[in-house]
Amino acid sequence: MLRTVRGKMIAWLGSVLAVLLIASGIIIYLLVRDTTIPMIKDFSQEVLIARSEELGRIFEGYINEVRTVSRRDAVRSGNLAVIEDDLVSLEAWMNNDFEMLFFADPGGDFVNSMRSYGNVGDREYFGKIMKHGAPKAVSEPLISRSTGEYVFVAAAPVYDFQGELIGLLGATVLLDTLTDIAMSIHIHGDGYGYIADHN
């Protein structure tokens, strides 16, 4: 008789403890879920904002470098042969992220630092600068007409010595470069960053 009473008490006490442990686990889970998940989301958001600001600074740096080249006397001359030679001479000194530099005249005809030619008059960045007077433009990802690679373009207007708009100077940056920057974003172990255009 004593063993069954002891057994019943142990079983009853065990059941009560199991219920208390399960209830405690549920309460702790709910508390952690309501505090930790928002905290992780906030932290991830801060990381993404910081990285997007970093990308913004990189883009602004590209634009500043392009503006600097656009103010060179050879470029401001508007003479395509002179500009081509000047861009080729800058090849060794240009930013390692740049695939090439190019100058496009008001009709969209371009010459670049790889000594190739073409027309970019239908490109959106061209229209922004040449038709709408934008002080700078960064393109959506596109296929380079010189190399066939996926690139984006950082461009700035070119003014002659009288202050007239005579074209634009651009730099192409391989999309792989931007992808490498995005892939370096790590969020809470398994998270990752990616870049999307406005579409």
Image (tube, rainbow, N blue to C red):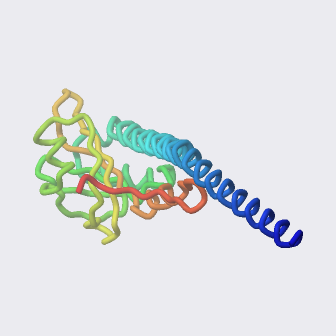
Q: Quadrant of residue 121?
A: bottom left
Q: Is residue 47 visible?
A: no
- Image quadrant holding the C terminus, namely bottom left
Q: Residue 70 appears in which quarter of the rendering?
A: top left
- How many circles with numbers are drawn on the protein? 0
Residue 167 shown left or right of residue 72 in the figure: left
Q: Quadrant of residue 52?
A: top left
Instruction: Look at 72% across and 57% down and name the residue there.
Output: 17
User: Could you say which is closer to the camera, residue 82 or residue 53?
Assistant: 53
Q: Position of residue 114 (x, y in %)?
A: 36, 63
Question: Extreme front residue here?
Answer: 1
Quadrant (top left, top right, bottom left, bottom right) of the N terminus? bottom right
Residue at 79% in and 62% down: 9
Which residue shows up at 77% across the image and 67% down it? 8
Image x and y of residue 13, in percent:
76, 59
Residue 183: % across, % down = 51, 60
Towards the viewer: 182 or 171: 182
Q: Is residue 100 above or below residue 170?
A: below
